[in-house]
Structures are given as structure tokens and as C-alpha cells.
Image (spheres, rainbow, N blue to C red):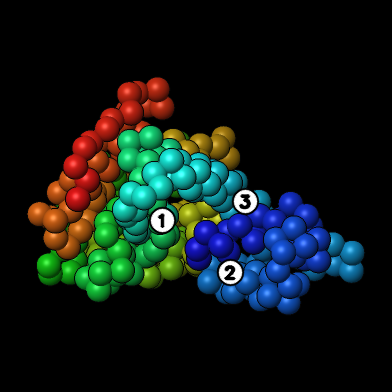
Amino acid sequence: MDFKQLRYFVAVYEEGHVGRAAERLSISQPALSQQIRQLEQHLDVSLFERSSKRLLPTLAAHTLYNHALPLLDGMQQAVEALRHFKGQALRTLAIGVLQTVHTSLVPQMLERVRKAQPHLVVQIYELTGLEIERRLLNGSLDIGISYLPARQPGLHGVLLYEDELKVVIPADHPLREFKKVSLKQAAELPMLLLGEEFQVRQIWQAQLANLGRRPQVQAELNTMVGILDSLPHTKLATVLPGRSQDEHSSQALLWKPLSEPRVPLKVGLVCRDVQRQQATLALLRTLLEDVMNGPHGPTATVDGLA
């Protein structure tokens, strides 16, 4: 998924018609339809229900639209800011991000980077942990925002914040009165989980393996938002990073800390060459800490971005 596909998706979503969206984008209707199909295949979700008169967005489409707008707006503002730097060498910074890290980080980070370094073009890719590490090693990403420690030799991490796995259940679940859920209790729960390619799922499986258990998987979805939207309509549970509750609070869901033992998570910046990326790491760490400490904190500027 890239910004072009997001821009195409937004046009189709807002127009409700491929033909009108194609006119708005000045591309052919078949080319636009192909891009939307590719996006659906990449995300493995259906974004539109086709009818004879118009396209009806699915719940997944509503969710994607709400995330796409701040990303596209941030990128457009960055492009406009770059017009003031004609003749200066522009630099692209490619960042891979897990969808399960603090969900407010990316849109707010884009705005802060634009103000701190207006000559920098930021490219954001939402990827699995394994893909982030693979791209860091082959040089197609500069920085990853992922769980620490990095699993591949040759990668280094800088801690951003600590989190922990929590059990998420519907409000009418049998464990609703429990203040905490033990790991052994959670191992017995039928679950709706992210796919095995996701690092949160791998961390959970590793914890259960220490008990000689496997997760009781009843269903899988490939988006955290999809799981949280679906969970209230089931009797299933899931496990997700606790900080996600800040962005996805709902009276229909209860977030229970895990105990005996708790499952800590460390989220950080990951790169291949710490020395070469030292200034970039310092900039991003400062800006991301600003985001996590509140929306009204001062925007930091770090000179000498290498």
C-alpha cells in the first residue's frame, strides 16, 4: 500500500462511483479499478460493495478512510513546504511502522517532521515486523518502528516506550468481573487473533509455548481495527498492546491486564547503521516522545540531519 493507492481509494470513497473518481483523478476507469482491486488484495479486505448504481463502502473502508485522510494531508503539507527549498538537495526518509504500535504516532509524527525538517520527504509504510526487518537489511527502509529487541542480526534498536499485552473481551464476557487475567486463564480462551505474520501474535504464541500450550484460535483478521470492531459481536477474546486502548476505547470492550506473568512489550526505533542514522534517530525520538507526552508539547527541531 502506498500514498498513490490511498489517494485513489479516497477519491472512490468520496465519489461513490469509479467513473466520477477516475475523472477527478484524470486517469482511466480500468486503471483506477485495477488499483482498488490491488489495494483490496494487499489488505485482504473488501472495501466496497458493488451495486448497479454506486459503490457502497464497507466497515473496513470507513476505517481506512479515517486513517488515510491525515496521512495524505500530512504528505501534501510536506510537499508544499518543499516548494520553498528549490535548489536544495531533498532527502527521502522511508519509515516502516507496525499497525499495532501507538496508532496516533504516524499522523502526528508527520506534522512534526514537516515543521522540524521541511526539506525532508517522509515515506511511511505499514508492514509486519518481519518485513520491516527485511527491508532495513536490504536498504529499502531507513528506520523501523517496531518491537524490541530486533530479531535479525545486524539491526539495532532505541527504546521509545514500554507497553504490555492485555486481554480484550466483550463487555458481557464471563471474565468481565476479573481485574486481571492470568496467562493460564487466557490460554483457555477462544480467541480472535491477528494472523501469524504479526509480531504481537508471535509474542503471544511464544508466551503460551512456555506453558506447553497453543492459542485457542477461532478466527483471524489482519487488522487490529477489524478485530476491535468485530469483538463485541462475539464471545471471543483477543490480546493486543495495552496502549491501543487509548485510541480504541469503547464501552463494548474491556481491557484486562495479564498477570502471572505479565507480558511486557518494548517499542522502539530500529535501524541497520546507528552511526549513520544517529541524527535521524535523535530527531524521530524527540518528535515521537513529544507526541506521546501530549498534543500541545513543544515541537523539537534537531539540526544536522544526516
Check disc 3 and give the amino acid type.
Tyr
Under tag 1, what secondary structure?
A: strand
Residue found farthest to the front:
87
Front tag of 2 and 1: 1
Residue 128 screen position, x and y as percent: 37, 65
> On the rendered structure, is 149 left or right of 167?
left
Spatial CA span between label 2 and label 1: 16 Å
Spatial CA span between label 3 and label 2: 13 Å
The residue tagged 2 is 39
Q: Is residue 170 above or below residue 189?
A: above
**Whether residue 297 is visible:** yes
Residue 203, label in figure: none
Answer few, some or many: residues within 10 Å of disc 2's Cα (few below 14, many 20 plus, some between 14 and 19).
many
**Whether residue 12 is visible:** no
The residue tagged 1 is 124
Q: Going from the N terminus, do you reach mark 2 or mark 1 first?
A: 2
Residue 144 screen position, x and y as percent: 28, 57
Check disc 2 and give the amino acid type.
Leu
The residue tagged 3 is 65
